Amino acid sequence: MSIAATQKKGVGAFIWEYLTTVDHKKIAHLYLVAGGFFFLLGGLEALIIRIQLISPENDFITAGLYNEMITMHGTTMIFFAAMPILLGLMNAVMPLQIGARDVAFPFINSLGFWLFFFGGVMLNVSWFTGAPDAGWTAYAPLSTTSPGHGVDYYILGLQISGAGTLMGGINFLVTIVNMRAPGMTYMRMPLFTWTTFIASTLILFAFPALTVGLFLLMFDRMFGSAFFDVALGGNSIIWQHLFWIFGHPEVYILILPAFGIFSDIFPTFAKKRLFGYTAMVFATVLIAFLGFMVWAHHMFTVGMGPFANSIFAIATMAIAVPTGIKIFNWLLTLWGGSITINSAMLWSLAFIPSFTIGGMTGIMVAASVADYQYHDTYFVIAHFHYVIVGGVVFGILAALHYWWPKMFGRVLNEFMGKLAFWTFFIGFHLTFFIQHFLGLMGMPRRYWVFLEDQGLDTGNYISTIGAFFMTFGVLVFLYNAIYSWVKGEKAPADPWGGRTLEWAIPSPPPFYNFKQLPLVRGLDPLWIEKTEGNGKMTPAEPLGDIHMPNNSIIPFIMSLGFFIAGFGFIYQTDYNAAYILLFGGMAIALGSMLVRSLKDDHGYHITKEELEREAD
Amino acid sequence: MSHDHSLNPETMPHNPEKATLEGRNKFLGLWFFLGGETVLFASLFGTYLALKNSTAGGVASQDIFGLGLVFLMTMLLLTSSLTSVYAMYHMKNNNFKKMQLWLGVTGLLGLTFLGCEIYEFAHYINDYDFTFRSSAFGSAFYTLVGFHGGHVLFGLCWLTALMIRNAKRGLNLYNAPKFYTFSLYWHFIDVVWVFIFTVVYLMGSVG
Amino acid sequence: MKGWMGKIKALSLLGFLALILSGCGKENLTALVPKGYGAEVSMDLIILTTVVMLVVFAVVMAIFIFVLIRFRKKKGQEDFIPKQVEGNHTLETVWTVIPILLLIIIAIPTVLATFDLADETEASDSINIDVTGYQFWWHFDYQGEDFQTSQDIYIPVGEKVYFNMLSSDVIHYFWVPSLSGKLDVNPENENTFYIEAYEEGVYWGKCAEFCGPSHSLMDFKVIVVSKEEYEQWVADMKNVDPDEEPESAVAVEGKELFQENNCMGCHAIGSSPVQTGPNLTNFGNRETLAGVEDLDKDTLVKWLLDPEEIKPGNKMTDNYPALNKEDAEKIAEYLLQLKHTDITSESAEN
């Protein structure tokens, strides 16, 4: 294989290239496109939910369909939109930021993507046969007794994609530990790399709890075990513990990378180094650590007793301290800077007030006795949308505008960027702010209808109007993305006056990233070279052969095997013929694993001569 | 840089498993993976502890657990851990044949362990009518111990594939990390079993 | 741009303020107008945390807006390179310590209130009601009194009333926002808490844990009456004669149909320890039909003909003999005259 072989030759070759790619930048594209697609689906589901709630006792959709909508909206947005888009960004940017040529396990990187993808497809296939309807939290025994196969699809979809996410997490951890460029010490890593590292640790330690929970659910539903069957001694609270031992760190898996994004964007557009870098790193670590200690604050009303409730309340409140440190450090990064405001910066700036509100309501729900009123009402809906949308989605959109040139070689249109921002931003606050009050006024969450004459009409109406604004904003962004692909202006290597390594190489980067690994001399390495008048990175090695991994179709086939086996698991309760799918699928998956294990794959080398020729 | 990583006493590095970047990545990756596995088993242990007395009036742990067989199984697995250490010792001395031999012994011990486990389960099912579906305790017991058994089975398949694939070509820098990661995994499985032996069987026999 | 953002914030705040002033929701439903001890304790904590948080928010916003106005890139200074500040230990200590102090201010009352509300020492001397949650209705058994109700609970004003809650199927939450915060109704472990109402009235209760298709229709009422009225009510409920002949001829026919169709297989009238469907004692005095509908003959007939249309996923649909409209009307007539006491919600509202 040579450089020429990896270039586009036609639609077929293009598709084949993406099916087999192990290049982290192309896998990032896959994550972003697939995650973006699921984001649109989840958004559509959200819009349908809001239309149903536009007026009291509305009958736009039935109760059963409504429950499927809310379940799919939550599951899709968390697992198949927010997570993969962030994983996509990490894939695109993190190896560049540490000066690596690829990730540690390119093959596993690809496998992780395809498992996620087939998991997402699996979940959404359920729309044709009856979607899951037990909520994204799938509390037993509602989930174990839910008729039909909806919840089965939920279990298998999450199980398959969860395995992929876990692989992604391990891959990033090893990459960051082992593959940093010379001079890139831990305390010189950009914050986005740091948060990738910490979020990957969280993935590693949180996802197995979900895996176990899903297995228990699966065994109860498909194989007659009795984990959650009270008649046989089961206990439904176990599910809640396992789910939230995973579920709370999951919140930080989502928000920490967003923090990292903002920590990279603010210094760039304020032309000022990140204020309190060390404190920012330790705050991240502390948040992650505390994130594992607080899961039971989701269960204040379960009846754990005042001791447990008090401990978890205080532990939860403690998280506010490192989070507050971060907010003030960002503000002080801007203080004294020379601030440019463009689309990427707008999303980042809007994050500060929006997320602060979400964080503050977080403290409010952490006060256990107050939470007896908030719990499972629209107040909580408002709280976590302020965190997830105001934090994570704003972060993703900021990152997309910021790194779009690096990832796709095109610049997004500024006018459309601003239009999308303002409509989405206004719509967001319109939708969710009022929900704090709706909750306290007596509207529990997951209500298919609310009754007339209970003082809930106006709030719900405003909320729905806001949802339309947000929809419009998303559509504008989508158009902007397509427009940039067709007609967007070509991006220079360093469009923003960047400070970190990814801006030291062309946009988009060549597939081997760095012709020569750069020598890192401090935090914000490119900025250092710029201020010292070099303008580019000093190489840390002479030009030489570059070792690259081979493409492989095995990850795709292996994931397909698990996907097929998933249907076998679901339908073996009805038909014995489904065992063919089960064993057939597993045979494909395990067979691919065996092939991978037995067949040596040493990769290939780009020779020095080829690299020199390319430079001309 | 060539593709030929095969080793002779002169080129033999001190730690062949960590001599290449790929090797170091595999080594570290497996450690992280085991970290995740720890949480997996911790969750299963938690579930088991929560449900170990939820017999729904059926068979309880002290009615069925006999320590004899389980003690034998513990010895088998601990010994297999030791033999895998021998194998790694010979790997570092570039003695491929002895490494294969000790890996083979490791595999046989693992297989015997698995056989004992299957016998044990069959015994509970046939003689006590104690199954996966009997009670929440039954579900939790078979899930925890079964997950461990599944890990042993996977380890055996892994080992077999490794030994057969590399039987003819000897040790090199490409496959040394693979052998080494297997042995790490195998130690982990043993450690988990020690916890199962203590938490499930010893504590369960006392009731 | 920064002006915009500020204006939007100010405008939206004003808007919401107006909304709050126009009402905190429906009285006796909203948690914002507490009328019981639990709700009041929660509300105090809500106010305290809100105030602290608004102070923090004001500080953040003040710095934020100042920074945006003061440090925008200026014309003619495009090449200006700001000083690269690494950090400031004093400042960083300040914004670590102050939040900790603020959290202590919140944490202490939180812990005190948590223990306060968990206090069950008086349970044995008080009224105890066993609550069972079903998809999608509530069953209430007055301990030691040998009678049961469904959907409506009567309690005396100013007294601690303990609720011992268990679910018969999936998890439900028992929530009467105006009187107290919520607590889970789990299938495996009984949860206990109390309500102490300050004022007489009819309070809306809701199920707050997602429990299936009709989760949003699982409302119940807590009717708080005076001590004397409560005692009268208990006495009346204990003296129900289930076989009492109705006065009107139609209702008599309805009663016969009720028996012929084996409605009692699930629905008891009078005391019964076993229940598959809601207990219908005193049905004519119920606040609502099925928790959410007006209690009148037309709606009841509609329910009897097709309960699914009112409560999707309920357990009655298809589990009883099909009725024709005529029979349904007769049964409705019978059920609506089941008034076993003079103590009703009107007593609470006077």
Image: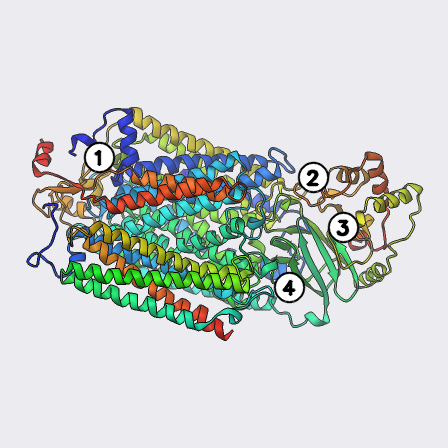
Q: Do labels 2 and 1 share a chain?
A: no
Q: How many labels does the image show?
A: 4
Task: State left or right for residue B98 relative to residue C173.
Answer: left
The answer to whether marks 3 and 1 mark residues whose Cβ atoms lie closer than 8 Å is: no
Q: Residue under circle 2?
A: C308
Q: Residue under circle 1?
A: A507
Name the kind of residue labelled 2 in the image: Glu
Quadrant location of residue A85?
Answer: top left
Q: Residue under circle 3?
A: C266
The answer to whether marks 2 and 3 mark residues whose Cβ atoms lie closer than 8 Å is: no
Disc 4, SS: strand
Task: State left or right for residue A293 relative to residue A545.
Answer: right
Crowding around mark 2 (Cα neighbors within 10 Å: few <14, some 14 to 19, many 20+) is some
| Front tag of 2 and 3 | 3
| Front tag of 2 and 1 | 2
**Comes first in the chain, label 2 or label 4:** 4
